[in-house]
Image (cartoon, rainbow, N blue to C red):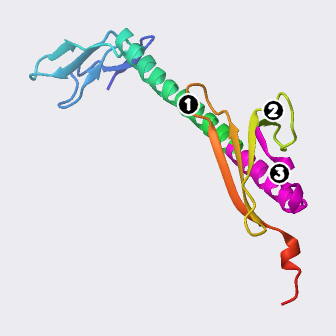
């Protein structure tokens, strides 16, 4: 059997010089994009094959960019929503702490001096300290004294987001004059 090898830049092709036809069922691939297969016993039939694509079409690239843009837009919207919810949660918890701190302060105040602590829309900082540039607004309402007790309501407001209602936290308690509790029964 005489074999000769033709080297193509793409393939190696081996020919049997004694039997020029490939055996039955054998497909011969040439370097020029031709597939040759035996069609009858005498000569092989060759057909042109499509070259393999190695790059993307403009439509495929456009669809990939569109899908990426939709995913990016959804991610940005989600991040924005999460950030605003974190701001809202933080401001709500701070407003609750400011109102609770104010009520604790009033509980430790002399009962007859409670009316001195009434205020309307006092700007306060995150610690509840009055500040002209505070983002929180605190209102303390002292009810009228009835049977040595009075109702105290502390309301704290905080801005949240433009064009949305502000955060409002309101705490109410009843303060009792400690002198009536000290009497012996």
Main secondary structure along the magenta-highlighted residues:
helix
Q: Position of residue 146 (x, y in %)?
A: 72, 65
Looking at marks 3 and 1 on the same chain, the residue that comes earlier in the sequence is marked by 3
**Mark 3 lies on residue:** 115
Whether label 1 touches label 2, CB < 8 Å: no
Badge nearest the viewer, 3 or 1: 3
The image position of residue 169, as x and y in percent, is 66, 47
Q: Which mark is residue 134?
A: 2
User: Disc 3 and disc 2: Cα gap in Å?
Assistant: 24 Å
- Vertical position of residue 38 compared to residue 93: above or below: above
Relative depth, front residue between 145 and 92: 145
Q: Answer with left or right where residue 158 lies relative to residue 177.
A: left
How would you rate the neighbour count of disc 2 (Cα within 10 Å): few for under 14, some for 14-19, many for 20 or more? some
Q: Which residues are magenta?
A: 92-120
Q: Dot 3, how many residues are within 10 Å of its Cα: few (below 14), some (14-19), or many (20+)?
A: some
Decide which of 93, 145 is in the foreground and name it.
145
Q: Name the residue at 89% across, 55% down.
A: 113
Q: Residue at x 84, y 62 (%)?
A: 107
Residue 183, which numbered label?
A: none
User: Label 1 belongs to which residue?
Assistant: 164
Find numbered disc 3 in the image and state the secondary structure of the residue it sits on: helix
Q: Position of residue 77 (x, y in %)?
A: 53, 29
């Amino acid at each position: 059997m005489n074999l000769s090898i033709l080297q193509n830049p793409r393939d190696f092709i081996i020919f049997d010089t004694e039997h020029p036809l490939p055996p039955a069922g054998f497909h011969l691939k040439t370097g020029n994009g031709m597939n040759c297969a035996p069609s009858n016993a005498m000569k092989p039939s060759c057909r042109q094959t499509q070259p393999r694509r190695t790059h993307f079409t403009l439509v495929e690239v456009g669809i990939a960019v569109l899908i990426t843009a939709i995913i990016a837009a959804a991610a940005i919207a989600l991040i924005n929503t999460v950030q605003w919810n974190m701001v809202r949660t933080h401001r709500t918890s701070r407003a609750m702490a400011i109102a609770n701190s104010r009520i604790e302060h009033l509980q430790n105040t002399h009962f007859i001096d409670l009316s001195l602590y009434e205020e309307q829309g006092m700007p306060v900082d995150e610690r509840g300290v009055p500040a002209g540039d505070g983002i929180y607004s605190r209102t303390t309402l002292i009810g009228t004294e009835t049977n040595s007790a009075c109702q105290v309501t502390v309301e704290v407001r905080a801005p949240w987001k433009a064009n949305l209602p502000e955060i409002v936290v309101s705490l109410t308690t009843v303060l009792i004059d400690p002198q009536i509790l000290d009497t012996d029964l």
